[in-house]
């Protein structure tokens, strides 16, 4: 198999349960010790990364190249006629080369690698683990074709595949995988249908019409929250369903956003509008509100940056106008604020944090300045240099560009940013360590070993 570049681990350092994986905007992957942030090895691919999966033994990496490929329609294999309910199919033309790579967690060597095609769109290649299979929609056999594929996690061989509707378009097809079920969206621009499949066989379990904007799954996959209604409708319905058969468990008010669900029927959501929004916990069985607090205390709950553990609800965001990474921790039983942490805001605090990394960061900053001079000279545009000097990040070294990604275990909360990875104590909110300070890790969520 092809080895794309891996550094050997430090001798005598264990891997597995006490590690985590992070990936950069530019395709490099690192395995770190969770307790200290020490780098065990790195793997360089140069490809855009999707969500990483870490089992403790193997790390699965979906990726794609940014260069789009176009294949003439007359060179594509014949497409079978569509079923009556699918409507006419469009001939696929554009796609991106995509890959799924299995790395050894011990030393980063490649165990196997699958190649395929990622349909056009703005999302990264999705990937999820369900028992002994990996679920993805980025490995269709022909350019542009949309299908959901289940791969054997040990060998990368295809177990089953199913069509994902129209081959073109930007809509997300694989909405989620949990509890042994795969959630797939099929349909056109205005009309989507949710198909729930058995992860082991690909057999369809149940469907639901007019499902929009993705799904939220409970911690073990027993419940699913989704929005139902035509996309042109002014007031779509938000439902929480039993994932086993699609029966309705509860309906959520239209001004609410569901951030997390538990298998025992607790929904954590934000309700209201603008300055009057509040975060609350609701018991779905009888609709009782367990607690409710003003979002002036926990800060804005941003969908996609909220994670729940057994004891705490963590919300990650960028503060305004400082543009610092902030994490707020709430007690899941009472809603009380446990702690609030934000990344260092000033140069002196950053220098203290960087410590022995300071020389490398100075070299990095000088290299950035040199690139600005070269760009201004080649473009014969002094405004480039002026913009970097006056508005560059050196003026506000703590300010972040882009978003934040969170992961958490019992000991720490891990915050991936474009200024590296921060590890914050889950009990006190104190910063424990800061790793890879010159690396942009903001697009990829850190991956901890899965509990199987």
Image (cartoon, grey):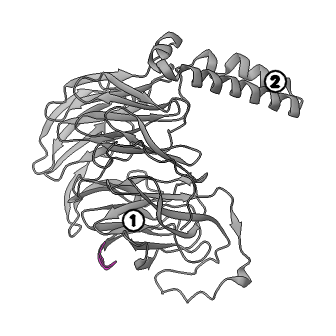
Question: How far apart are labels 1 and 2 at the CA level?
Answer: 49 Å
Question: Could you say where residue 415 lies in the image, as x and y percent from the top left?
Answer: 40, 34
Query: Which sits in the foreground, 173 or 5?
Result: 5
Can you identify the residue that label 2 sits on? 383
Can you identify the residue that label 1 sits on? 210
Residue shown at 70% from the left, 27% from the top: 367
Q: Residues within 10 Å of mark 1 (few under 14, many from 20)?
A: some
Query: Which sits in the foreground, 178 or 92?
Result: 178
Q: Is residue 407 left or right of residue 97?
A: left
Q: Is residue 131 left or right of residue 421?
A: left
Residue 305 visible in the displayed image: no
Q: Is residue 107 left or right of residue 363?
A: left
Badge 2 marks a residue whose secondary structure is: helix
Q: How many marks?
A: 2
Q: Is residue 306 above or below residue 213?
A: above
Q: Which residues are magenta?
A: 199-206
Where is the C terminus found, in terms of image quarters? bottom left
């Amino acid at each position: 198999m092809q080895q794309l570049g891996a550094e050997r681990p430090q001798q005598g350092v264990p891997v597995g349960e006490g590690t985590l994986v992070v990936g950069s905007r530019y395709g490099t992957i690192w395995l770190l010790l969770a307790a200290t942030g020490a780098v065990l090895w790195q793997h360089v691919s140069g490809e855009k990364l999707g969500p990483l999966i870490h089992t403790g033994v193997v790390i699965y990496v979906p990726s794609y190249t940014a260069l789009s490929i176009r294949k003439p329609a007359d060179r594509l294999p014949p497409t079978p006629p569509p079923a009556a309910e699918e409507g006419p199919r469009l001939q696929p033309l554009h796609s991106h080369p995509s890959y799924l790579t299995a790395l050894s967690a011990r030393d980063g060597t490649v165990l196997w690698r699958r190649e395929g095609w990622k349909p056009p769109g703005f999302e990264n290649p999705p990937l999820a683990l369900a028992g002994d299979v990996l679920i993805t929609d980025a490995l269709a056999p022909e350019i542009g074709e949309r299908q959901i594929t289940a791969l054997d996690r040990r060998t990368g061989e295809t177990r089953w595949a199913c069509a994902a509707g129209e081959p073109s378009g930007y809509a997300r097809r694989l909405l989620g995988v949990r509890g042994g079920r795969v959630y797939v969206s099929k349909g056109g621009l205005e009309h989507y249908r949710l198909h729930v499949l058995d992860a082991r066989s690909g057999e369809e379990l149940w469907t639901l019409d007019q499902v929009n904007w993705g799904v939220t799954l409970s911690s073990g996959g027993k419940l699913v929250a989704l929005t139902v209604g035509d996309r042109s409708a002014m007031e779509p319905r938000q439902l929480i369903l039993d994932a086993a058969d699609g029966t309705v468990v509860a309906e959520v008010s239209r001004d609410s956003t569901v951030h997390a669900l538990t298998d025992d029927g607790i929904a954590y959501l934000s309700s209201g509008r603008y300055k009057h929004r509040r975060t609350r916990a609701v018991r779905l069985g009888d609709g009782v509100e367990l607690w409710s607090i003003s979002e002036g205390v926990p800060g804005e709950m941003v969908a996609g940056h909220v994670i729940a553990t057994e004891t705490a609800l963590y919300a990650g965001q960028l503060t305004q106008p400082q543009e610092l990474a902030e994490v707020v921790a709430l007690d899941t039983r009472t809603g009380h604020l446990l702690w609030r942490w934000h990344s260092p805001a000033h140069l002196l605090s950053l220098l203290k944090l960087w410590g022995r990394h300071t020389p490398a960061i100075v070299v990095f900053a000088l290299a950035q300045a040199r690139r600005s001079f070269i760009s201004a000279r080649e473009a014969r545009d002094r405004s480039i240099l002026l913009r970097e000097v006056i508005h560059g990040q050196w003026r506000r070294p703590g300010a972040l560009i882009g978003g934040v990604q969170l992961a958490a275990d019992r000991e720490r909360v891990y915050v991936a940013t474009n200024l590296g990875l921060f590890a914050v104590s889950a009990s006190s909110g104190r910063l424990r360590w800061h790793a890879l300070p010159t690396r942009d890790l903001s697009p990829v969520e850190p991956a901890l070993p899965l509990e199987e």
